[in-house]
Image (cartoon, rainbow, N blue to C red):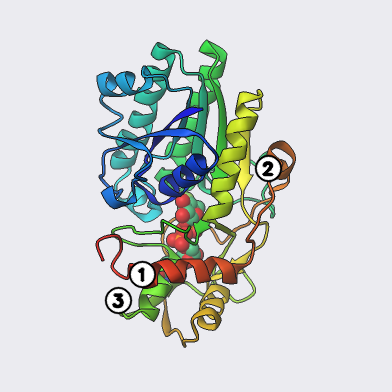
Amino acid sequence: MKILVTGGAGYIGSIVTEYLIEAGHEVVIVDNLSTGHREAVDERATFHHGDLLDGDFIRGVLGDGIEAVCHFAAFSLVSESVADPLKYYRNNIGGAVSLVGAMAETGVEHFLFSSTAAVYGEPDETPITEDAPLRPVNAYGNTKLAIERLLADSAGAWGLKSLSLRYFNAAGASRLHGEDHDPETHLIPIILGVVLGVRTELIVYGDDYDTPDGTCIRDYIHVKDLATAHVLALERLAAGVTGAVNLGNGQGFSVLDVVRAAGEVTGREIPYRIGPRRPGDPPILVASSRRAEELLGWERAQPGIETIIEDAYQWHRTYPHGYGS
Ligand code: UFG
């Protein structure tokens, strides 16, 4: 299939591109490089440097034989979205509206959407199923939920077929690509930055949550398993499966569990200090992945937190300062 990957120069987009190409698909990438990296663009893909908000540009790309779209391009920092919601509404919702509009005009009907556990907010029950109430607690989650609703409305209006993949905590690296955000806010790369001496300290954001050790619990899912899920999801989408699917491991680790596991993997003591809570952080987010297993036939190959950290460590050792290293 000829697939458009928006945000293919970003962390998850670059790794999904790698897996799509290895599964035999032809990939066209669109990225404005506002947060992505030119070096992360797979050399086997066709690359267009441009912005989704530019309707003529995106219609031109879609009109050149695209059969399905994987949409990753978005801002994705929860704390930044709390401080500057307009930035998120403009870019995330604006970009999706422009893209879906261009799809309607060019007759491209299949859409795989990079959604998030943040659409659930602070869930009443764990593990979280897809039927849990959708009540985001930050602007980032609100923008992703608004896009999910746009997709559902577009299905009714003109027959768009979409699958929204709600990622829990993507982590790890692939053979070719890893995580390089500026600023970096994610736990595992920050811990590894401390191990590699490129960061001075790790602050644990709050130890007074209602969890066994007081720190937040998350469901860390290997980015390679996420990539496999996208390849399967595209096949299922073509076969008529639509809706929303969680992608997680179904297992929760506290911040201090991750610090300990990273200490074991790297053989280093990881110094940290306890700081205040970070605004917008729900205490526990753990997925039920049953629907993904049933609908997509998804099996996770590397569920262990140690493997996730080990693969991330290998990438960060090669690129201690990110892609520019
Ligand atoms: N954390 C720290 N110190 C740090 C960085 C993170 O203690 O320096 C903690 C956070 O408070 C959180 C946990 O580590 O409890 C994980 O934080 P991340 O920033 O790695 O990931 P988040 O859980 O905040 O974010 C993920 C996804 C988002 C999604 C969000 C849902 O990356 O896309 O889950 O809340 F929106």
Please say whether residue 277 is visible from this viewpoint.
no
Q: Residue at x 55, y 40 (%)?
A: 23
Disc 3: residue Cβ within 8 A of ligand 1's nearest atom: no
Location of residue 187 in the rendering, given as x and y in whole percent from the top left corner: 45, 67
Location of residue 21 in the rendering, given as x and y in whole percent from the top left corner: 48, 40
Location of residue 119 in the rendering, given as x and y in whole percent from the top left corner: 53, 43
| Image quadrant assignment for residue 184 | bottom left
- Name the residue tied to disc 1: 318
Question: Comparing marks 3 and 1, which lies closer to the viewer?
Answer: 1
Q: Earlier in the sequence, mark 1 or mark 2?
A: 2
- Name the residue tied to disc 3: 198
State which quarter of the image contains the C terminus.
Answer: bottom left
Q: Nearer the viewer, residue 89 or 20?
A: 20
User: Are circles 1 and 2 on residues that touch, CB within 8 Å?
Assistant: no
Q: Earlier in the sequence, mark 3 or mark 1?
A: 3
- Relative to 66, say whether 32 is above or below: below
Q: Nearer the viewer, residue 305 or 319?
A: 319
Location of residue 287 in the rendering, given as x and y in whole percent from the top left corner: 65, 52
Please say whether residue 187 is visible from this viewpoint.
yes
The amino acid on which the numbered mark 1 sits, given as a three-letter code, is: Thr
Q: Determine the CA span between mark 1 and mark 2.
A: 33 Å
Q: Mark 1 falls on what kind of element?
A: helix
Q: Nearer the viewer, residue 150 or 44?
A: 44
The amino acid on which the numbered mark 2 sits, given as a three-letter code, is: Ala
- Name the residue tied to disc 2: 292
The amino acid on which the numbered mark 3 sits, given as a three-letter code, is: Val
Q: Label 2: how many residues lie within 10 Å, few (<14), some (14-19) or many (20+)?
A: many
